[in-house]
Image: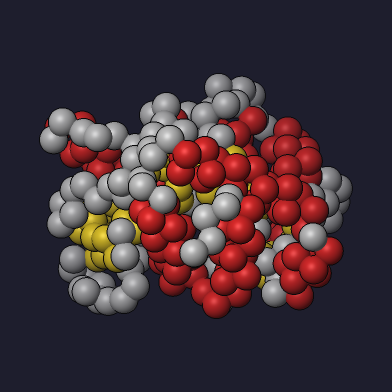
Amino acid sequence: MASVLTYLSAARLAGVVETPRERSLRRYRQFAARDPRVLLGIDPQGAWGEPELLGLMARRCGVSADPRRRSGPDVIDPARTLAALDAFAERLAAAARRHAPVLFGTGHPRSLLGFYAALADALSAAGCEVLTPAGGRCVDILTQFGLRTHRIDYVRRVALVRETEGGRPGCEPGAHCHSPLPVRVVLEAAAAAGGPLPELVVGDHGWLCGAGQLGFEAIGPADSDDPAPFVGQAEGAVRVVVPLDDGVRSSHYLPLTRYVLKRACLSQ
């Protein structure tokens, strides 16, 4: 366990991370104002003002609770990350035991695709059906450049979106995306086809929050500048949120993959 904690800090997955404090505070302000760009599909029920959000993120992530600290890098408590990874592994193990259908999706394909793909392979080997509905379906997503059409795609059974025009069509590994619209389209397509529907959704950003808000068991990672998953967890919409930097080099997640699979008794 000590070695995992050391690794989390050394790889900048937790501890002092690359996420700027200024960006985190800006996102908290936007969430408090109910900006849909940072809600990620969560429909908050509580009165989440900036002080409440900062307190929540301090408790769940380990960021500084001092509102006077306005700059510098953010901090994520490695012990909180490790505890959440254990809870994350427990949910994977439970899904494997009941051979549950599962869905994987990411808005961070450059960093997290390999992490999810390894988990998908392990759950498939354990007898779970890894779902891939709505492949090729298009969805219009509001981005910083305006409304853009994206196509839902699957890489190694992990859902992601690609821009169809005005970007780099067919680029690997996919587009960075916060929107909950893709997971809604995917779940609607699965229901329209007569199922099965996922008993567990594993993902980040809109995939995590959008599925959880619709009542699906949802687990996944979130950075210190994304309060929505943590609010969703606090209100019962999201089951497990792992606080970590979600944008580091993809190879840095490999030890976490091995740790989670071992804890879930899914190691090959």
The number of numbered discs placed on residues in the rendered structure image is: 0
Front one among 13 and 257: 257
**Residue at horizontal 18 percent and vertical 39 percent from the top:** 189
Residue 140 in view of the camera: no
Residue 22 in view of the camera: yes
Image location (x, y in percent) of residue 73: 75, 67
Front one among 10 and 46: 10
Front one among 149 and 113: 113
**Residue at horizontal 55 percent and vertical 77 percent from the top:** 251
Image location (x, y in percent) of residue 38: 50, 46
Q: Quadrant of residue 145?
A: bottom left
Q: Quadrant of residue 161?
A: bottom left
Q: Quadrant of the N terminus?
A: bottom right
| Left or right: where 240 falls relative to 100 | right
Image location (x, y in percent) of residue 268: 49, 64
Image location (x, y in percent) of residue 185: 24, 41
**Residue at horizontal 27 percent and vertical 38 percent from the top:** 187
**Residue at horizontal 62 percent and vertical 70 percent from the top:** 255
| Left or right: where 175 falls relative to 54 | left
